[in-house]
Amino acid sequence: MSTIAEKEKVVKTPEITAEVLDLSGKLQKEIKIDREGVGLIDSEAYVNSLPEGITRETIEIIQKHNTTFIAAGLHAFGTKAIDMAKKHDGMTSASLSIATVGKDTIDYNWKRTREVPSPGTSETKTTYGTTTIGVTTHATSNTGELARIKKTLTAQAFAALGN
C-alpha cells in the first residue's frame, strides 16, 4: 500500500521542454480514446504540426528518398557481403550501419545461412543470404526527452492509479 507522500515523491520527475509540452497540449485536444482503448486523431495532425517552411511535399520527397536509399543500400551491401563470403568461407555474417542525419541510422545485417521451418513439416531447411534491416530513429530511443516523458508518465500513472 502506498501513501500519498510516496506518490507525491514519485511524481517529481525531470523537466519536459516547453516545445514538447506545447505540442502535446495541442495534440491532446485532438486525441480521442474510446472505451476499448483505441486512440483516434485527425489524419492531418502530423502535417498540421510541421514547422514553418516544412510542407507535406517536403516530407513526401524525403520519404521517397528514404525508401529508395534503404533499398539501394540493401542491394549494395548484400551484393558486397555475398562477394566477401565467397572469398572467405569463415565469414558467417556481416553488418553495416549507415548514419543518416543527426543520430539516426539504417542498419543492415546479412547471414550466410539460416535454418528455417519447412512448411507443413517439423523439418528445417537452410536458406542462404538472409538479410534484416532496421531503421533507428533517435526520437524513438529511450534517451533524452523521450526517457524523461516515459518516466513522467509512469509517475503520473502511479499517482493516479497506484495503490
Image (spheres, helix red, strand yellow):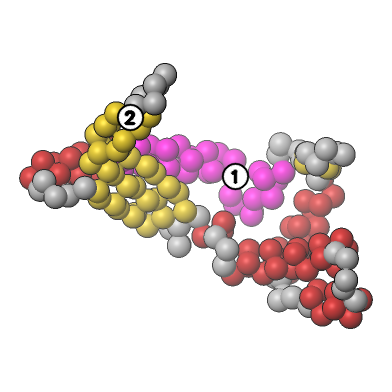
Residues tagged 2 and 1 counted as in contact (Cβ below 8 A): no
Question: Compared with residue 8, is residue 122 higher up or lower down, i.e. above or below?
Answer: above
Judging depth in this view, the residue of 82 and 43 nearest the camera is: 82
Question: Compared with residue 49, is residue 127 higher up or lower down, i.e. above or below?
Answer: above
Quadrant where the image shows the C terminus = bottom right
Image disc number at residue 82? none
Q: Quadrant of residue 45?
A: top right
2 vs 1, front mark: 2
| The furthest residue to the right | 4
Q: Residue 161, how many percent across, how many down? A: 87, 61
The answer to if 36 sits in the magenta stretch is: no
Residue under pointer 1: 55
Q: Residue 111, how many percent across, how many down? A: 27, 43
Q: Quadrant of residue 127?
A: top left
Q: Tag 1's secondary structure?
A: loop
Disc with the residue nearer the chain's start (2 vs 1): 1
Residue under pointer 2: 124
- Spatial CA distance of label 2 from label 1 is 49 Å
- Give the residue type that dot 1 points to: Thr
- Give the residue type that dot 2 points to: Thr
In the figure, is residue 4 to the left or right of 18?
right
Question: Compared with residue 142, is residue 86 higher up or lower down, i.e. above or below?
Answer: above
| The furthest residue to the left | 87
| The furthest residue to the front | 122
Is residue 90 at all visible to an observer of this figure? yes
Question: Compared with residue 162, is residue 8 higher up or lower down, i.e. above or below?
Answer: below
Q: Which residues are magenta?
A: 45-74
Is residue 76 at all visible to an observer of this figure? no
Q: Tag 2's secondary structure?
A: strand
